[in-house]
Structures are given as C-alpha cells and as structure tokens.
Image (spheres, helix red, strand yellow):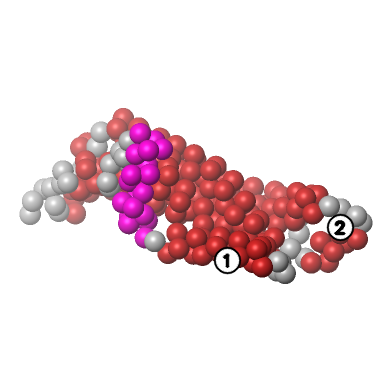
Amino acid sequence: MNSNTGLASYFKFQDVNWPNLGAAAWETIWMTVVAVIIVAIVGLLLGLLLFETKDSKSSLVKALNWVVAALVNVFRSIPFIILIVLLLNFTQVIVGSITGPKAAIPSLVFSAAPFYARLVEIAFREVDGGVLEAATAMGATRWQIIYKVLIPESMPALVSGITVTAISLIGYTAMAGAIGAGGLGQLAYTDGFQSYNNAITLAATVTIVIIVMVFQFLGDRVVKRIDKR
C-alpha cells in the first residue's frame, strides 16, 4: 500500500510543518474574530430593524420590512462557496485583493450577518411583552426601551446566537481557504490534499475542532454569567 495514502499516513506527524500550522491557525482565528465582530454589529442592526418594523401600520415601513427580510432570506439561501464567487469583484474593490485572509471577510460577513439577524429577531420576539409594556407605561422612549430593556433582556439569546454564528464562520473560513483565503482550510487543501500529505490534513482538522470547542466554551461561559434566570 502507498505510504502516502494508507491509514498510517494520517499519523506521520513528522511530515507536518508545525510553524505553518500555527500561522494558518492564527489566520483562521483572525478571520473568525474580525468577521464575528462585524457580523454582531450588522446582524444586531438588521435584526432590530426587522423586529421594529414587523407590526407597523405604515405602508412605507411595511415595504422596508419586506425588502430587508427578502435580502436577508436571499443571502441566507446562497451557498457560501457560490457567494464567494459572486462577491469577487466587490471584494476586489473593497479589499484590493481576492486572495488572503482579508479578502475572505466580505463573503463571511454577507453570509453570516443575515443568519445572525434572524437569530436576533427571534431573541427579541421572546422577550416578555409585559416587560416592554411596563417600560412604555413608565414613560420610556422607544430608544430607551431598546437599549435598556429589549437588548439586556435578550442578551443571553444574543450571545448564544453569535456563538453559533461564530462556529459556522469557522467552517466558512475553511471553505474560503480552499480557494486562496488562507487559514487552516487552505493549508489542509494545498499542503494536505493536493500534496498527498494526510498528516497535515488531519492536523488541520483537529486544530479546527479545537478552535470550535474553544469558541463554544467561551460562549457558554458568557451566557451562563449573564443569564439571570
């Protein structure tokens, strides 16, 4: 059996360039963290917009809600690998390149922000209506209700949602890496799969799993700390 394709080839860790693996892991973490920060902001704003306009009696506001909801649904429906290709020209204009970790950020944001926006909208809907009515009865303005009642009351769900989104983004970075965005995905594809180095593929996979577990652990700890129920 070929030593490069047999089961034992996955454990030839002497063939792994560990400094390259560390650099690729850092690129994956960097892409994920930057994308999560942007997605958290954009997704929160989109989710708030969907929530605030859903029951409006104004035709203009209803139209706005329909347009935003349609855009969210469209971008949620496009497979990530196709979205990357669709946004190549946009990425070139914004970032100045279509390769490297920075070039992956626009596609990551466009794919994950609509997903998180829906999670935000759901989190807001689950807030007890009596609490919102009480704040209104006490004379709070709509903006005061949003940042003093709505967001704080839904914070555990918001953090859980961004944790789920972050884990999805880690998977997206791996797909982006396969077409030149760097990170563990590119390492596993070019140095692993294309070079018939199964040990690198396994090492990159295990590293991605560890990163996912760390993000999940941190998200769970934050939720546990802020959840007062």
The magenta stretch spans which residues? 79-96
Q: In the image, what residue type sits under mark 1?
A: Trp
Extreme-right residue of the structure: 138
Residue 118 vertical placement versus 10 (above, below): below
Residue 80 painted magenta:
yes
Residue 164 vertical placement versus 181 (above, below): below
Q: x, y (%) of residue 43? A: 57, 52
Q: x, y (%) of residue 39? A: 53, 48
Extreme-left residue of the structure: 1
Which residue is labeled 1 in the image? Answer: 66
* Secondary structure mostly taken by the magenta-highlighted segment of the chain: helix
Task: Count how many numbered circles sit on residues in the image.
Answer: 2
Extreme-top residue of the structure: 19
Q: In the image, what residue type sits under mark 2?
A: Ala
Please identify, in this view, whether the residue under mark 1 or under mark 2 is nearer the observer.
1
Which residue is labeled 2 in the image? Answer: 135
Image quarter of residue 191: top left
